[in-house]
Image (cartoon, rainbow, N blue to C red):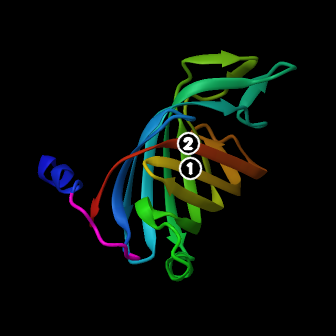
Amino acid sequence: MSLIISLAGLAQEKSNDLNNVLRINVLSPGIEFEMPLSEKSTLAANTGIGIQGSYLHLDYTNSGITYYIAPFLDVTYKKLYNRESRLSKNKNLDYNSGNYWGIRLLTNFKEVESHNVLRKDKTSFALGPTWGIQRAYGKMHLMFDIGSVYYFDTKGNNGFFPVMLQLNLGFNIKKWDR
């Protein structure tokens, strides 16, 4: 592994190739690893501790603002579709920058803190299609996506939420060829 990480420092020519990327996310604190699956798709796994709103069928809630803070695992398949266009316009492709369609699975574990919410189960999932953008500005990373989700827990509670937003800001730490 240390050999792979040491290779990340090698200079690369500007190309349309996707890279393995290691990043730290600040907005939803976590460590993310994104790896190419093909010439136009990646798989990103992000783990950390984040703030989550309550889901109607998975939580008992009081009035007012409801949220909990819990460890999470967020896995997203991304099919990047505009990298050729970005390359022809001499736009940045670093750290897998581009627009994508994908599917996201978010798993939340037992909360460490909550406000006006009591979860029915300590583990919950949200699965659904997503559209997003990710950009690199030097070492800075910006990612935004939107989609709908089917949410459920291990006790059989479930529901549908029509619009789920995600915003991540962070730092690209390393990249290396696949």
Q: Which residue is mark 2?
A: 169
Tell me, yes or no, whether the highlighted magenta stretch contains residue 93.
no
Query: Few, some or many C-alpha atoms within 10 Å of disc 1 (few <14, some 14-19, many ≥20)?
Result: some
Rendered residue at 45%/36% (across/down):
30
Name the quadrant containing residue 34: bottom left
Tell me, yes or no, whether the highlighted magenta stretch contains residue 11.
yes
x, y percent for residue 68: 65, 24
Q: Amino acid at mark 1?
A: Leu
Query: Few, some or many C-alpha atoms within 10 Å of disc 2 (few <14, some 14-19, many ≥20)?
Result: some
x, y percent for residue 123: 55, 34
Label 1 sits on a secondary structure element that is strand
Label placed on residue 36: none
On screen, residue 66 versus residue 141, left or right, reads right
From the viewer's perspective, is residue 101 above or below residue 7?
A: below
Rendered residue at 49%/66% (across/down):
92
Magenta segment, which residues?
10-16
Distance from Cα at disc 1 to Cα at disc 2:
5 Å
Rendered residue at 46%/33% (across/down):
48
Precedes in sequence: disc 1 or disc 2? 1
Location of the C terminus (image quadrant): bottom left
From the viewer's perspective, is residue 111 above or below residue 4?
A: above
Whether label 1 touches label 2, CB < 8 Å: yes
Q: Which residue is mark 1?
A: 142
Rendered residue at 27%/60% (across/down):
176
Report the magenta stretch's main SS. loop
On screen, residue 26 versus residue 173, left or right, reads right
